[in-house]
Image: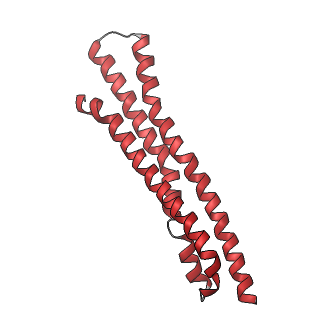
Amino acid sequence: MELLKLYLDHFIFGVLGFMSFIMLTFVIERFIYYIRIKSKLASFKNSTELDIALTNNLTTIFTIGANAPYVGLLGTVLGIMITFYDIGQGGQIDANTIMLGLALALKATAMGLIVAIPSIMFYNVLLRKVEILKALWLQYEKV
């Protein structure tokens, strides 16, 4: 339990930081790609080819947004377990110790939400850009 106590925050925040880095990398890549592809829409032969090109990496962005709260929740649950373990080892119930342990455990959930909310927002913005680019492609096809 001591090992878990030492490395829990580092592990959870490391995973959330990595998820955030991947999400931001893919979001920036998608924005740049959509700007560049706008003038080349006519080169796509069919809608499936266009769909594959436009939605690349969107699943990863959504998956990060959907799972980041669970990673944070895992950190919170483990932090609460550590708090109860410390209470059990000490043999005394001190309200300050309990409240401090629970408050510190909740920071993992907050970090999970901090990663998830922008991920889902960026995903929705990018999905809207995909819809617009598909509509523009359909216009090129009609001409």
Q: Nearer the viewer, residue 71 or 13?
A: 13
On screen, residue 109 above or below 103: below
Number of marks present in the image shown: 0
Q: Quadrant of the C terminus?
A: bottom right
Q: Which residue is pictured at 44% across the width and 35% down the height?
A: 108
**Left or right: where does residue 80 sit relative to residue 116?**
left
Q: Position of residue 77 (x, y in %)?
A: 41, 34
Q: Position of residue 8 (x, y in %)?
A: 32, 35
Q: Which scheme is used to colour this image of the protein?
A: secondary structure
Judged left or right of residue 37, residue 70 is left
Along the horizontal axis of the image, is 136 left or right of 14?
right
Identified at 30% across, 18% down, the residue is 88
The answer to which image quadrant residue 102 occupies is top left
Along the viewing direction, whichever of 50 and 32 lies nearer the viewer: 32
Q: Quadrant of the N terminus?
A: top left
Question: Which residue is located at x 48 percent, y 53 percent?
Answer: 64
Q: Position of residue 18 (x, y in %)?
A: 40, 50
Location of residue 104 with respect to 112 vertically, above or below: above
Depth check: give the residue in front, 59 or 141: 141
In the image, is residue 53 above or below residue 122? below
